[in-house]
């Protein structure tokens, strides 16, 4: 199926099509290189049973003229966090319901996140043709090949979601999936504060409290400046340099420059970096960002809980990475719940519906993880 290119003159046609739709499929093309916030270059829309449309956001006033109509109908997306983030800005909001095939599939399988082609093969039994995903979407006019590639994926989304939804309904997880998608929508629309940027560093587990404070201060500075300048964080200061400064902070600003590994490109920021290091060093250990410190009791608990989550995901047929992600497990390892109600509050409704009882049994000590030969066993204690 070919797609119609939307113009200001054909906007009323698309508005009418959207008004008659129950759900639409949406996809985008964007460039994330050399930017903190990716640049949106194309929006693909498919109205099931109707036509496919391509909207060029570079055309003045075009996307804005569709914002109200697009926000009034439910969407189907695949791995849509970036689509939601970009279109939420461009449209001034999002529809109440955005259904994500990647999340739905993660509630039916241990694997997450899975690529679009993999899901099409698994749920629809079709193999997608290989195509380049590295097109330059900024150039105009776009080629016929680019436009066809852009619209191909969005055409399959409704059928893919319908197949996933049928299996979710068979397992009593349809409402859970909608709640999980709603949580993902809210998370994508919510800007993560710069002070949380340290959480992306696995090296934090190996740092003592004062070093984690330095890590948090430097990453917070870097994240805020990257947002302000709309440039990738690593172009300001690389992750390796941040870890080095956090683990072995210098005593003076000149000490930063004395390190021969400190990048020349970051020398213009040395005063701000030193101020961040100082702030981290001045904080008390109690004020350090919480993290299970390597070889501590919470860290050992986290290692066991990771194995427990993997086995639980296998037995339930859900992705532990989606349902019991590492941030959640770390928080539970640091501060274990002491009642079933607390488990429900910490997990939230849809996670609690899936794994709440098993989680309480685990924290209450009535569930064990063991081995029988090469088989992992998760069961009640005796």
Image (spheres, helix red, strand yellow):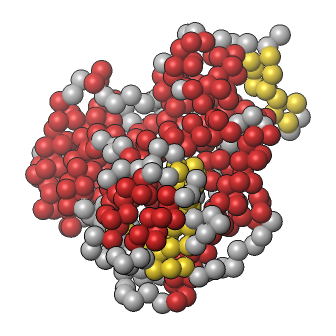
Q: Residue at x 20, y 67 (%)?
A: 264
Closer to us: 15 or 381 = 15
Q: Is residue 219 above or below residue 126?
A: above
Residue 117 picture quarter: bottom right
Can residue 375 be seen in this snapshot? Answer: yes
Q: Where's the N terminus, which quadrant?
A: bottom right
Q: Is residue 284 above or below residue 275?
A: above
Can residue 201 be seen in this snapshot? Answer: no
Q: Is residue 327 left or right of residue 307?
A: left
In the rendered image, residue 195, in percent from the top left (x then y), is placed at 28, 39
Q: Is residue 182 above or below residue 345?
A: below
Q: Residue at x 56, y 61 (%)?
A: 25
Closer to us: 340 or 204 = 340
Q: Is residue 136 above or below residue 371?
A: below
In the rendered image, residue 74, in percent from the top left (x then y), is placed at 53, 51
Closer to us: 159 or 48 = 48
Residue 291 picture quarter: top left
Q: Is residue 339 left or right of residue 119?
A: left
């Amino acid at each position: 199926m070919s797609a119609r290119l939307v113009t200001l003159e054909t906007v009323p046609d698309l508005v009418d099509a959207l008004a008659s739709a129950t759900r639409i499929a949406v996809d985008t093309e964007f460039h994330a290189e050399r930017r903190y916030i990716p640049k949106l270059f194309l929006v693909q829309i498919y109205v099931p049973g109707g036509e496919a449309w391509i909207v060029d956001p570079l055309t003045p006033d075009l996307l804005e003229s569709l914002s109200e109509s697009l926000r009034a109908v439910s969407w189907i997306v695949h791995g849509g966090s970036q689509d939601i983030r970009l279109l939420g800005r461009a449209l001034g909001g999002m529809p109440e319901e955005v259904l994500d095939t990647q999340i739905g599939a993660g509630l039916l399988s241990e694997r997450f996140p899975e690529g679009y082609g993999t899901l099409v093969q698994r749920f629809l039994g079709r193999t997608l043709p290989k195509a380049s995903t590295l097109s330059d979407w900024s150039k105009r006019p776009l080629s016929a090949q680019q436009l066809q590639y852009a619209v191909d994926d969005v055409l399959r989304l409704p059928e893919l979601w319908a197949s996933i939804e049928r299996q979710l309904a068979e397992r009593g997880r349809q409402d859970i999936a909608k709640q999980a998608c709603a949580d993902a929508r809210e998370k994508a629309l919510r800007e993560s504060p710069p002070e949380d940027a340290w959480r992306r560093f696995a090296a934090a587990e190996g740092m003592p409290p004062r070093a984690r404070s330095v890590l948090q201060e430097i990453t917070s500075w870097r994240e805020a400046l990257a947002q302000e300048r709309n440039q990738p964080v690593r172009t300001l200061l690389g992750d390796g340099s941040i870890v080095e400064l956090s683990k072995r902070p210098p005593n003076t600003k000149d000490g930063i420059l004395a390190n021969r590994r400190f990048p020349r490109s970051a020398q213009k920021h040395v005063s701000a970096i030193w101020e961040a290091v100082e702030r981290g060093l001045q904080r008390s250990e109690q004020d350090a960002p919480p993290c299970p410190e390597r070889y501590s009791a919470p860290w050992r608990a986290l290692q066991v809980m990771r194995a427990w989550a993997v086995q639980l995901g296998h037995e339930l047929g859900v992705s532990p990475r989606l349902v019991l992600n590492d941030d959640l497990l770390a928080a539970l390892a640091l501060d274990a719940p002491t009642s079933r109600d607390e488990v429900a509050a910490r997990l939230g409704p849809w996670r609690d519906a899936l794994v709440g009882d098993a989680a309480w049994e685990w924290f209450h000590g009535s569930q064990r993880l063991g081995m029988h030969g090469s088989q992992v066993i998760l069961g009640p204690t005796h």
